[in-house]
Image (cartoon, grey):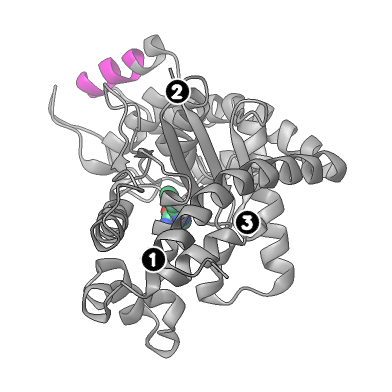
């Protein structure tokens, strides 16, 4: 049996944090065992915000090393850099002809970004979902593991794929479905600032690459309160968040110990944070070591990127050939 095809990408705009790991990358590592996975670094998408060339280069290198350090295995999955596969941008051009201004303008993430940066509402931003659709359907993906914030973009990808199929009276593209593991494997990791999830832009993250000293500092600074005064009271969000983090990285008996202390109004947040910091460090330190080793080995990274690009291009070229035939841009004379 052919393995179902999975595509997912991450923009190289910063270090991966615990939220990225438990929300996505860990699932990628599992998926590579039973799916035909394409995991890529979406460097073209990150151009909407005009990074400097140095920052872009460094960002791509960082994410690549982090993917590998987390256990994405180039022998099992196809790991590549988006701009190494020019077929994607070619398909993007074709898809753009059937992507309408109205629907693109109505996309939530477009409106959001346009509102935040009114001086930089560029065409790349507007057609961001088209490029993303090209990333996905060029490999005829069936599944796309993405978080909630990307669901609308994925819906657009289905729309563009379906539209192409109808327009050219074919069934070239499967409609890509969002992927979620049974049992909610994609954990939402909270931030340390009392509310909401851990995010790149929220500035509340702990990075896999982070120095242990810095992790301890960040955890010790996490928002808490004066502590419960009534036995068995419910936990306010900042406290619940600390427990959620602890459940992710600590042994269950440790979580239980602090949980019971909380219920008895005997909890000492200082102790809890110390424990949490150590457990986070124990988890991230080996990954950090691997990131550092991989970053030093540019030859290895170049080899991975090259092999990945070759595999991705092979799949992309096959699809693009069919697309061109259907559209009629393939020379017949
Ligand atoms: N837009 C995604 C994000 O910001 C990144 C991305 C680009 C992507 N192309 C994709 C994700 C294709 C999944 C599939 O997170």
Say whether mark 3 is within 8 Å of ligand 1. Answer: no
Indicate the secondary structure of the residue bearing disc 2: loop
Within 10 angstroms of label 1, few (less than 14), some, or many (20 or more) residues? many
According to the picture, the residue beneath numbered tag 1 turns out to be: 130
User: From this viewpoint, is residue 229 visible?
Assistant: yes
Indicate whether residue 263 is drawn in magenta.
yes
Q: Main secondary structure of the magenta part?
A: helix
The furthest residue to the bottom: 119
Measured Cα–Cα span from mark 2 to mark 3: 23 Å
According to the picture, the residue beneath numbered tag 2 turns out to be: 2
Tell me which corner region of the image, top left, top right, bottom left or bottom right, holds residue 314.
top right
Q: Is residue 72 left or right of residue 8?
A: right
Q: Which residues are magenta?
A: 256-265
- Quarter of the picture containing the C terminus is bottom right
Q: Residue drawn at (33%, 29%), measured in percent from left and top?
A: 243
Indicate the secondary structure of the residue bearing disc 1: helix
Q: Residue drawn at (62%, 62%), measured in percent from left and top?
A: 86
Q: Is residue 68 depicted above or below 203 in this figure?
A: above
């Amino acid at each position: 049996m052919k393995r179902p095809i999975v595509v997912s990408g991450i923009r190289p705009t910063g270090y991966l944090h615990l939220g990225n790991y438990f929300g996505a990358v860990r699932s990628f590592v599992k998926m590579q065992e039973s799916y035909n996975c394409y995991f890529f670094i979406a460097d073209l998408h990150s151009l909407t915000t005009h990074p400097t060339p140095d920052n872009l280069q460094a960002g791509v290198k960082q994410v690549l090393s982090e993917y590998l350090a987390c256990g994405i295995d180039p022998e099992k999955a196809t790991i590549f850099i988006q701009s190494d596969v020019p077929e994607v941008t070619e398909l993007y051009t074709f898809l753009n002809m059937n992507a309408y201004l109205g629907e693109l303008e109505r996309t939530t993430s477009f409106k959001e970004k346009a509102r935040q940066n009114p001086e930089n509402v560029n065409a790349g931003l507007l057609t961001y979902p088209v490029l993303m659709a090209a990333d996905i359907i060029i490999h005829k993906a069936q599944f796309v593991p993405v978080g909630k914030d990307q669901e609308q973009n994925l819906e657009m990808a289905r729309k563009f794929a379906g539209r192409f199929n109808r327009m050219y009276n074919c069934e070239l593209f499967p409609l890509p479905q969002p992927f979620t593991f049974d049992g909610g494997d994609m954990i939402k990791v909270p931030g340390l600032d009392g509310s909401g999830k851990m995010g790149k832009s929220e500035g509340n993250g702990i990075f896999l690459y982070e120095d242990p000293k810095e992790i301890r500092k960040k955890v010790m600074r996490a928002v808490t309160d004066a502590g419960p005064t009534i036995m068995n009271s419910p936990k306010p969000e900042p406290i619940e968040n600390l427990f959620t983090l602890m459940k992710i990285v600590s042994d269950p008996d440790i979580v239980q110990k602090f949980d019971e202390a909380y219920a008895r109004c005997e909890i000492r947040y200082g102790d809890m944070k110390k424990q949490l910091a150590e457990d986070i460090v124990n988890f991230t330190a080996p990954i950090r070591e691997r990131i550092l080793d991989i970053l030093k080995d540019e030859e290895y990274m170049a080899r991975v990127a090259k092999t990945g690009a070759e595999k991705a291009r092979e799949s992309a070229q096959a699809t693009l050939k069919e697309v061109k035939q259907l559209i009629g841009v393939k020379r017949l004379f």
